[in-house]
Amino acid sequence: PHSKAYFVFVNKKRTSLKIFQFSGVGYWMHLVLMAEGKFKWPQKSNEESITMTSTELQILLMGGDYQKASLRSEWPQAA
């Protein structure tokens, strides 16, 4: 729990995300609500968790489908 990772959870309707982050001195919870539509959350899998890059998280937060998105080759991947 004291890592630099973000822990992202979606509600059943896929209209809101909760993101938990440890800042070094405490925890932050970010709530993201979709005004229209739903988040493109991954289909159910047998895995308890998935790993995504910061770029994929940004695509998800903007309402995109990060599993189908691709970056142009000259665009660097975010760290």
Image: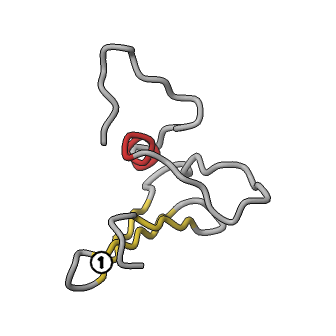
* Res 2 quadrant in image: bottom left
In the picture, the quarter occupied by the N terminus is bottom left
Residue found at x 38% / y 40%: 55
- Is 48 displayed left or right of 56 in the figure? right
Residue 29 position (above or below residue 26)? above
Residue 25 in the image: state x and y as whole percent: 20, 84
Q: Is residue 23 above or below residue 42?
A: below
Residue 41, percent from left and from top: 60, 51
Residue 67, image x and y in percent? 58, 36
Seen from this angle, which residue lies furthest right? 46
Task: State the quadrant of the C terminus.
Answer: top left
Is residue 7 shown above or below 60? below
Residue at x 54% of width, y 53% of height: 51
User: Which residue is under mark 1?
Assistant: 28
Q: Is residue 59 left or right of residue 66?
A: left
| Amino acid at pointer 1 | Trp
Is 23 displayed left or right of 34 in the figure?
Answer: left
- Graded by Cα atoms within 10 Å as few (under 14), some (14 to 19) or many (20 or more), the crowding at tag 1 reads few
Q: In percent of the image, x 54 and y 60: which residue is there?
A: 15
Front-lying residue, 71 or 41: 71
Q: Position of residue 47 (x, y in %)?
A: 72, 60
* Mark 1 residue element: strand
Name which quarter of the figure residue 26 lies in. Answer: bottom left
